[in-house]
Amino acid sequence: MQLTAEELKLLKKHCKIDHNSEDDLLEIYYSWAFREIASAVTDKPSKYIDWFKSHPLFARAIYPLASYYFENRIAYLDRDLSLAPHMVLSTVHKLRGSFEQFLESENDEI
């Protein structure tokens, strides 16, 4: 998934980096986070890409998760790598509720 320049800049802020040498890696982690979060909300994430990209809660989850992947790309003995940021899980639950409302409103229009 290709990041816009604005999205890449924001992801770099989350990762606290200011160089360009790992941009390709950041795009991979962003793509992983996108698929992980979207598939936690619906079993047809590719059908609703526009909805996810436009939802403010999605951005609140994707950047911390992508930066978590980046920060934990190298394992350290003193770090517990089993837990992603708690805020991501909380936001995914909220996204599920919002997505259900979106689907209901789509069904009402039919």
Image (cartoon, grey):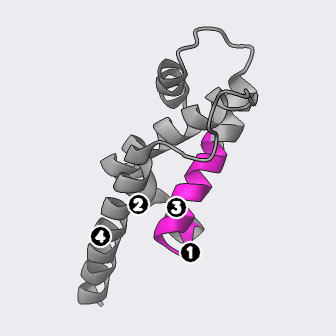
Element marked by disc 4: helix
Q: Residue at x 73, y 31 (%)?
A: 73
In space, the residues marked 1 and 4 are separated at their CA atoms by 16 Å
Q: Residue at x 48, y 44 (%)?
A: 62
Q: Is residue 11 highlighted in magenta? A: no
Disc marking residue 97 = 4
Amino acid carrying mark 3 in the image? Ala
Q: Which residue is mark 2?
A: 51
In space, the residues marked 4 and 3 are separated at their CA atoms by 13 Å
Q: Which residues are magenta?
A: 30-45
In space, the residues marked 1 and 3 are separated at their CA atoms by 8 Å
Amino acid carrying mark 2 in the image? Trp
Q: Residue at x 62, y 38 (%)?
A: 80
Q: Is residue 16 left or right of residue 60?
A: right
Disc marking residue 38 = 3
Q: Residue 88 in the image: state x and y as whole percent.
A: 43, 48
For the residue pair 92 and 109, the one nearer the viewer reads as 92
Amino acid carrying mark 4 in the image? Gly
Amino acid carrying mark 1 in the image? Lys
In space, the residues marked 2 and 1 are separated at their CA atoms by 12 Å
The answer to whether residue 103 of the structure is visible from this angle is yes
Q: Nearer the viewer, mark 2 or mark 4?
A: 4
The quadrant of the rendering that contains the N terminus is: top right
State which tag comes first along the sequence, 3 or 2.
3
For the residue pair 63 and 53, the one nearer the viewer reads as 63
Disc marking residue 44 = 1
Element marked by disc 2: helix
Counting other residues with Cα less than 10 Å from the Cα at mark 3, is it few (<14), some (14-19), or many (20 or more)? Answer: many
